[in-house]
Amino acid sequence: MQRDESTAEQIVIVGAGPAGLAVSLGLYRNGVRSVVLESSPALRASGYAITTWRNAFRALDALGVGDKIRKLHLHVLGLRVFSSSTGEITHELDFTSQENGGPHETCRVRRDLLLRAMEEELPPGTIRYSSKIVSIDHDDVGSDAKLVHLADGSVLRAKVLIGCDGVNSEVARWLGLAKPSYSGRLATRGLARYPDGGHGFAPEFLQFIGQGFRFGFVPCDEADVYWFYTWCPSQNDNGVSESAAKMKQHVLNKLRSSKVPAEALEMVERSDMSDAYAAPLRFRSPLSLLFSNISKGNVCVAGDALHPMTPDLGQGGCSALEDGVVLARCLGEAVLGESEAGTEKERIEAALRKYAGMRRWRSVSLVGTAYVVGFVQQIDNAIVSFLREKVLAGVLARSLLKMADYDCGTL
């Protein structure tokens, strides 16, 4: 590959999701430009909404967009957990109570609004859409740059390459990270819209657990309510993801056989499930995260490319924002020469190692805790169900607040 056949870039970020845009915006706030490659023709809203706990708002404040997000969403005031078999409340948690370490700032943020809030702060042209990465090579002319090959045949030369390209990350594969494992559970979700006067739901998070599934919903704002449904599949579930109608009917059938209230069923019925499907819940083994390369030379990963996890803590998007702030801080100092002495190459590689060290244990803790919480909440076993409803409900609920009590620092 000759140099005039590729385009030179300083920092290349793969993926315009929460992690990728957080890294790019954090670098820009520090005076460092980057380019973000997004495979889709526009910002993707798949997933509908993201839980933003206290740790996420600390990251958003560091990036300078926290108040933009706050103004657009309802603040969730608490959590109520119900038994799906009896309809009884098994635990309540007040996010405003000082006894619970509160107040805990929590919202369910629409993904499209979150991404747009960060995109609006970036210089025009930072995000390059319809730019799908197909392979990564070393530069064969003696530099330390990485050659990023795109589906349209173009090649970018990256002095730093950051993979924020999700659970099927091409960059993570290049680093040799283990392929994410299947948890044995599936999930679907939807967004119910109430444009004709509001939904009437209180600003709280409701969960129904038991009978082999977990269902929950929470308002995003006065007009939108996000809901999710996770379950362990059986042979009877074949074909449920063939269409949005079949997926919705599957969820409704399961909920009707439980003690979920009628207003929740109506919410699912009116939901937008245009891109709904039975998504396998996957995670990267904590053991793999302990010993694998999060960074190698001038390449690293963040967000789901680093720590895919089951959604049981609501920390996937939050931790991606944490990654973005920490990585932007470390890398910005290196590029601007504010870190330890040495060549730029040495500073960059040291910065990525520092980032990896800071995020490794946090990632292990989040992935492991999310898996355990999900397993206990969803297993359909008589003994575990009894313990879950009578003993463990409070422990599981408080784990949400414990894992959110984290500060990634400033830029």
Image (tube, rainbow, N blue to C red):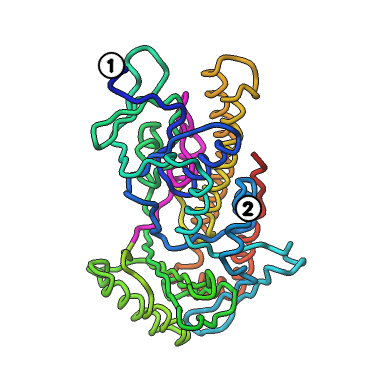
Residue 183 found in image quarter: bottom left
Outermost residue on the front side: it is 124
Q: Is residue 59 magenta?
A: no
Rate crowding at label 1 as few (under 14), some (14 to 19) or many (20 or more) other CA atoms within 10 Å.
Answer: few
| Element marked by disc 2 | helix
Q: In the rendered view of the protein, which quadrant contains the C terminus?
A: top right
> To which residue does mark 2 refer?
55
Is residue 163 at all visible to an observer of this figure?
no
Rate crowding at label 2 as few (under 14), some (14 to 19) or many (20 or more) other CA atoms within 10 Å.
Answer: many
Nearer to us in this view, 380 or 215 = 215
Label annotation for residue 2: 1
Q: Amino acid at mark 2?
A: Asn
Outermost residue on the top side: it is 142
Q: Residue at x 52, y 69 (%)?
A: 220
Name above or below for residue 51 compared with residue 344. Answer: below
| Element marked by disc 1 | loop
Name above or below for residue 66 compared with residue 188. Answer: above
Outermost residue on the bottom side: it is 262
The reply, left or right, for residue 257 in relation to residue 385 is left
Estimate the x, y position of residue 281 in percent, counting from the top left.
Answer: 39, 57
Q: Residue at x 28, y 22 (%)?
A: 5
Q: In the rendered view of the protein, which quadrant contains the N terminus?
A: top left
Q: Residue at x 57, y 34 (%)?
A: 355
> Which stretch appears magenta?
279-307
Q: Is residue 296 magenta?
A: yes
Estimate the x, y position of residue 367 in percent, counting from the top left.
Answer: 51, 50
Asked if labels 2 and 1 touch by Cβ distance under 8 angstroms, the answer is no
Estimate the x, y position of residue 113 in percent, counting from the top left.
Answer: 49, 59
CA–CA distance in space, label 1 to label 2: 45 Å
Q: Earlier in the sequence, mark 1 or mark 2?
A: 1
Q: Residue at x 43, y 50 (%)?
A: 283
Label annotation for residue 167: none
